[in-house]
Amino acid sequence: MTPILLFFFLYLNTLYLTRCDATVSGLYKNITSDEDVTETQHATCKIATEELVASARASVTRVLTGACNAKLIDERLQTLEENLCKELKEIKMLLHAITENRKRSTKLANIYNNDYYEDENDGLSSRQSEIDNFNNTIERISSVNGSTSVFFYYWQIKRFDEKLASWKTARSERSSTFYVGQNGYAMYIKVTPRYFPDGTVFIGVGLTRGRHDSILEWPFSHKIRLELLDHSPVQTRQDRRSRIWDPSTLCSEYFWGRPKLTGEPDNPECVGLSASRQVFFPNLPFSIHPLSKTMRYISDRDGAITIKLTVYL
Ligand SMILES: *[C@@H]1O[C@H](CO)[C@@H](O)[C@H](O)[C@H]1NC(C)=O
Ligand SMILES: *[C@@H]1O[C@H](CO)[C@@H](O)[C@H](O)[C@H]1NC(C)=O
Ligand SMILES: *[C@@H]1O[C@H](CO)[C@@H](O)[C@H](O)[C@H]1NC(C)=O
């Protein structure tokens, strides 16, 4: 590469000048042009470091001849500097891209392992950046066994505290229909604040009629999981997660088959997550730990709860 060679020769040249100045200074009196400078260098360098210079001589000559040696070197150095700056800039951009990518995949890995650590400064809800990043997305997750795709969906139920307090047994709220990916299955989540008279809360998930049903495979065979998200800071967080349900081993085709073409669009829910009332209103009057006084699952901002659905594709 020219820049490296150039440096090498410059170095040689300096070496020569320092070594030869004293011994052969007489020659300088006879210098009439730059070409002569070159000749002089050849002669004296032979004395100093004969072998080394012999091999480099041709190139040194090339670099140092001409009327504007200093100017030429200056220019070359400038070009070198510019190129270096340009390359450094590119490297910086590359590094930036790589870090961004890494950040996202770390987030993804954490969210997958239920260990998501968002920026604590988002101020809204402590789960908001997770939702912003992953709601309604399909993500590829690499593991030792290769990679799998996972669909995430988040549903927020507003003023859940009121519903929990006042809704009669079996009254429920259904999410809007959403699709698992672009041409995927249509699904819904349904929450029943008082599923049994004792107040058990039930969050179910099911299939519903969708635009792509005719091209999809039936029965639905993807494993799914539901979670009730904890809004507390990550250190004390305890999301309530269901196990991973496998449709092929749970319920019948009545639940996982293609939804009916007419009439009620929703298949009934086969699986769901249930939680007792105490989960939502922990009764810990004697606790001195400040966090245990706050509600984990109900947002103290707007009384909402957040459900997360994972579909393993
Ligand atoms: C300068 O070089 C010429 C030959 O190129 C030589 O005749 C002359 O003696 C030299 N002068 C000095 C001062 O060395
Ligand atoms: C990888 O595959 C093996 C055997 O198929 C299975 O037991 C294991 O749980 C898989 N690991 C992951 C991380 O999926
Ligand atoms: C997730 O995305 C869907 C579709 O864009 C949206 O309707 C829903 O409100 C989002 N969920 C949350 C918790 O923001």
Image (spheres, rainbow, N blue to C red):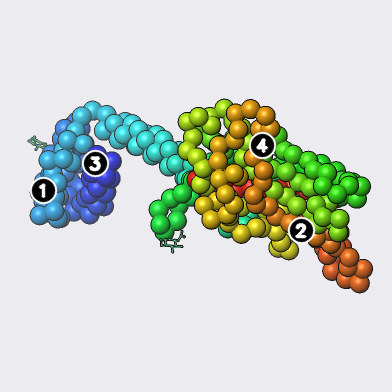
Which residue shows up at 46% across the image and 49% down it?
148
Q: Residues within 10 Å of mark 3 (few under 14, many from 20)?
A: few
For the question of whether residue 131 can be seen, the reply is no
Which residue lies under the disc numbered 4?
A: 266
Are discs 2 and 1 less than 8 Å apart at CB?
Answer: no
Dot 1 falls on a residue whose secondary structure is helix
Dot 3 falls on a residue whose secondary structure is loop
Which residue shows up at 76% across the image and 58% down it?
275
- Choose the circle earlier in sequence order: 1 or 3: 3
The type of residue carrying mark 3 is Met
**Inter-mark Cα distance, 3 to 4:** 69 Å
The type of residue carrying mark 4 is Asp
Which residue lies under the disc numbered 2?
A: 275
**Inter-mark Cα distance, 2 to 1:** 84 Å
- Choose the circle earlier in sequence order: 2 or 1: 1
Quadrant assignment, res 129: top right
Q: Which label is found at residue 1? A: 3
On the image, the x and y values in percent for residue 252 come to: 57, 49
Dot 2 falls on a residue whose secondary structure is strand
**Inter-mark Cα distance, 2 to 4:** 23 Å
Would you place residue 23 above or below residue 187 in this image? below
